[in-house]
Image (cartoon, helix red, strand yellow):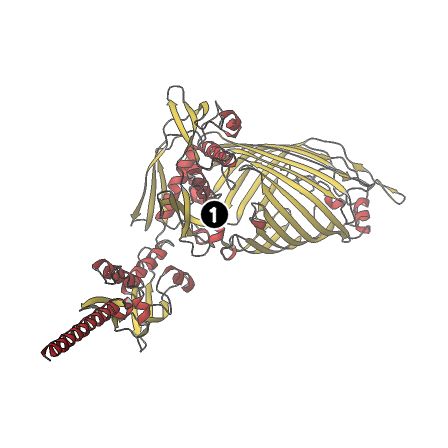
Amino acid sequence: MRATERDQRRRRRARNLQALLAAAVLALSALNAAAADPPAARVIVQGNQRIDAETVRSYFRAAPDGRYDAAALDAALKGLIATELFDQVKIDRAGEAVVVHLVEARVLVRVIFEGNKKIKDEDLAAVVQSKARGPLQRATLQADVGRIMEAYRRVGRSDVGVVPEIIGRGKDSVDLVFTITEGAKTTVRQINFVGNHAFGKRQLAAVISTSATNVLSFLTHADVYDPDRLAADQDQLRRYYRNRGYADVSIANARAEYDPTIQGFVLTFAIDEGEAYRFGSIDLQSHIPEVGPERLRARVSARTGATFDDSLVDRSTEALALDLAKLGFPFAHVVLHTHRNAEGGRIDMSFVIDQGPRSYIERIDIHGNTRTKDYVIRREFDIAEGDAYNQTMADRAQRRLKGLNYFKNVKITTRPGSMSDRVVLDVDVADQSTGDFSISGGYSTTDGWLGEIKLGDRNFQGTGTAVQTSVSYGQYSRGFDASVSEPYLLDSRATGAAELFAKQSFANSYQSYGSDTYGANFGLTTPLNEQTGVQWRYSISNQDVTLSPPSSGTTVSLPIQQAAAAGPAWVSAIGSTTTFSTLDSSKSPTTGINSQLREDLAGLGGDVRFLRTTEDVRYYKSLGGDLVGMIRAQGGYISGWGGQQVPLLNSFFGGPSMVRGFAPDGFGPRDLTPGSTTDNVGGGMYWATTAELQTGIPGVPDEYGLKASAFVDAGSVFGYTGPTTFGTQTVNVARSNVLRSSIGVGLTWGSPFGALTVNYAVPVTKAAYDVTQPFNFTASPF
């Protein structure tokens, strides 16, 4: 019995022990289950009203054991603050839980600008980072005050005042008002160059984009003091010198000082020119066994004995890098070694090709382009994300971006990527105004009194597309023109262009007839290299000769009558223009060559058939100081084909564009039939030459943009191929190749509308029947 009871007690104790063990297992399981709960369940969010709690919890990352250590909490705190959605963020622990205390940022309903007149609301809105429907952040607000002041500083107003005001609208929403006091304009009043001997003040002033205040500064805004522009001007001066032999030039100081006596800034560029050099020996070495130097030598543009030119060195380095990439060596880089021989005035150069480190472009990050689209900037790169990184190609892209003239400054830098063989390219740009609107008027000895309205943008809506339209109304002519130009047509480097035009001219003292012309031009320009480009074009136009009764009682010249009797004619032509240019400046060149060869074939459809070829070559050379020499040669030939004569309006007519001192249509084949209007009836060939000296005017401030010239012109138009009879009447046409020449002086003003030029020339040799005109005035864009 006792044994049975003992057994029962033993069994009860075993069952109790099993129950205790089961309870312990359940308790441990419960604890493990609690520890395995999602971390978000242990993050308590307080103070949020608009922001969802789960969004806040998503910033917390637990350690592998499910706990939040100090590093995790710090990362979550920084992440929440970085959202700028909260004015305050505080994280505490409550036992095993994490408590997040939040004060949400108020919402901006509107961002308003008051008192601004010189900068539009939309332009200021693009500058500030506080945006409507975004959070109000004190730090961002204060930074926006600085951004607005910087925007005004860039338009020449340094004493601007900006006061931000927050106006509550209830329910944690506010308006942000920036009250602006613009102050007086602070401009550049004087520009000085110190240490320059090789180049005069006028030449250097033409290189930089900043100019001193003048009567037209309100149009150009070039007198606005801008530190970024000043730095760019400093770089432009350095390049100008280095491209003309001065390899050791140093623009040691570009200083801007406010002078209260003249109420403006005085800019001073301190220049240490150094010695002028020529290219010495030029060597090419390759440390890549598969690439022999001889196969790449032709890509080096520099030549022994020529004036040292840094642009040729850059061009050679780029060409070598491109060829190496094509040969399958994208990481190869070109290192330039130089040795200066001061006594001989030479720089010996060696281009050394090495296999560079294997690094790739992880990203191209673009900053500062508030208007220009990203793709407009990216297409100037020959490299993209994932490509091999090459410093030469990055430098090439920077030069291209500067050449677009869309930006005030461009800077490309690199920083490490996510891995050791990755780099990130940082492209920092600052947009500038690219629009053009002008209402102009003037007088031309060719077109008489003339007014014009022009509207355009060379970077339309930030797309890189250039658009322009103009309407002109004058004494002897009226016209309309609208054009659009698209670079990188079809993702290539070809530029496509289209133009619609119409022009009506009237009889005047130089011709007894008028003309009506309208049509369209289409072109495709393809660059062959940095200096050469070819434009392929097609044009379709309708042209008609119109007659007015002669006021003198004479009879209109028979060739003119015949052209008018033929009626309107369609001219359908294809053509090309090959341009080669090494000019240092398209606006005011001082060195280099510019050549244009034009060829047109009419007759692919239409009513007329002819072949026309013209050539125009200009050579500029600096002769020291502000003196520049220019030599020009031009000529042309036109001939009908398919049994047709060259139409009157397509012939060549001699005038001041060939030899100054002669009237428009003043020389060339002329109808000398007695009793006729003795019109110039055009020729099939012409030639002309010019030798000219250009210089600034002593005593006249550079900012006025005045330039004087002295010239000698010579040329002729001949080869009349038109009709010699009209019914039973015979035409007496003087068609011989008579030399016309003149000497004269000129004055050019580089106005914001273009070059306004006055010439006075005296003919030296001419034909008895030529019409002279010593005084000639032309006004661009007329």
Tell whether 531 sits left or right of 557. Answer: left
Q: Image quadrant for the N terminus?
A: bottom left
The answer to whether residue 118 is above or below residue 167 is above
- Residue 549 lies, in percent from the top left, at 78, 53
Could you say where residue 31 lies in the image, as x and y percent from the top left? 22, 69
Q: Which residue is mark 1?
A: 405
Q: Residue furthest bottom?
A: 1
- Answer whether residue 320 is visible to the viewer in this image: yes
Query: Residue extending furthest left?
Result: 2
Helix, strand or loop at label 1? It is: loop
Q: Is residue 388 left or right of residue 775?
A: left
580, 733: nearer the viewer: 580
Residue closer to the observer: 225 or 405: 405
User: Is residue 773 something one can see in this rendering?
Assistant: no
State the residue at coordinates (34%, 53%). 186
Residue type at mark 1 is Asn
Write down the quadrant of residue 92 in the picture.
bottom left
Q: Nearer the viewer, residue 335 or 137?
A: 335
Q: Is residue 782 left or right of residue 164?
A: right
Out of 207 and 574, give the one closest to the viewer: 574
Picture coordinates of residue 183 (x, y %)?
33, 59
Spot the residue most to the front.
1
Give x and y (percent) for residue 162. 30, 62
Number of disc labels: 1
Query: Residue lying furthest top in this view?
Result: 343
- Residue 580 is left or right of residue 537, and the answer is left
The 10 Å Cα crowd at callout 1, few under 14, some 14 to 19, many 20 or more, is: some
| Residue drawn where x is 33% and y is 50% of the image | 264
